[in-house]
Image (cartoon, rainbow, N blue to C red):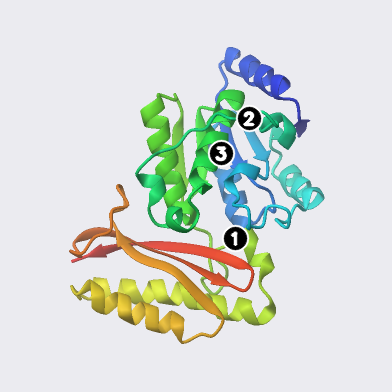
Amino acid sequence: MRIIKDLEEMQMYSFKTRCRGKTIGFVPTMGCLHEGHLSLVEAAKKKADVVVVSIFVNPIQFGPSEDYKEYPRPLATDKGLLEHFDIDVLFLPEANKITPDNFSSYIEVDKLSKKMCGRARPAYFRGVTTIVAKFFNIVCPDFTFFGEKDYQQQIIIKKMVKDLGFAIKIITLPTVREFDGLAMSSRNQYLSVKEREQAIILYKALCLARQEIESGEKNDHKILLRVRSLIGSVPNIRLDYVVFADPETLDEVKTLRGKILVALAAYIGKARLIDNLIVNAK
């Protein structure tokens, strides 16, 4: 596994790789790797000739009161996991090279970024799309891999790629879950033992919504009330949102028909957790 920190070195590596007719699979991460990330790495190895994984905790996607400084950075552990997967390159750029003091150029996918998580975190997706676009220009991948847990994020990135003409295929893989259904997340590390036990209610709430919708219930208000009541039955959980939305546009839907995205976000202790399911309504 080659470790590259310099931006120009990474660009040259990618240029030479493509000149040899090799394809590049790219897995962008913020580190603190878990089985969800590693499923993306495994998929990249099957799809592309060369696999590049980046670890970069992106400062411009965090709000002023969020957890940028506290975000877990177990780099030695992450390196060991990636060596086990025998990837080609670990890209470890420094923050002052990616976002120097005079950095002032941003990319924003307008409407999609203002929905769901964008309401509570108004600068979040602008920070994500800006840095992902910059990484695309540096790594020049043929394929980039994201997880469905961050559903809104991958929809926004797909839209950016289409609108700006990036010659990159975005591949999305299913959410990887713990044994009890909790979606794997680096922020799960923030949870105490008690909070970890309580967090499973989020997945149970999604499953309740799915059961209600797939059984033919058409009253969206009634289902949302039951979901909110279930989450509210657990102390110390503060619900940010739960929505029924179109899986492509992320517009909230009132008519429960066809494929529906059921998505939620909630605060448990220091952690803000998100999750979602795609449900087929009758």
Q: Nearer the viewer, residue 9 or 24?
A: 9
Mark 2 residue type: Phe
The residue labelled by disc 2 is 103
How crowded pointer 2 is (Cα within 10 Å; few <14, some 14-19, many 20+) is rated as few
Between marks 2 and 1, how big is the CA–CA gap? 29 Å
Specify which label sits upstream in the sequence, 2 or 1.
2
| SS of the residue under disc 2 | loop
The residue labelled by disc 1 is 185
Q: Is residue 111 left or right of residue 75?
A: left
Q: Quadrant of residue 108?
A: top left
Q: Quadrant of residue 67?
A: bottom right
In this rendering, the label closer to the viewer, 2 or 1: 2
Query: Could you say where residue 100 lies in the image, as x and y percent from the top left?
Result: 70, 31
In this rendering, the label closer to the viewer, 3 or 2: 2
How crowded pointer 1 is (Cα within 10 Å; few <14, some 14-19, many 20+) is rated as many
Specify which label sits upstream in the sequence, 3 or 2.
3
In this rendering, the label closer to the viewer, 3 or 1: 1
Query: Could you say where residue 81 lies in the image, as x and y percent from the top left?
Result: 73, 49
The dot on residue 44 is 3
Query: Could you say where residue 57 lies in the image, as x and y percent from the top left?
Result: 67, 45
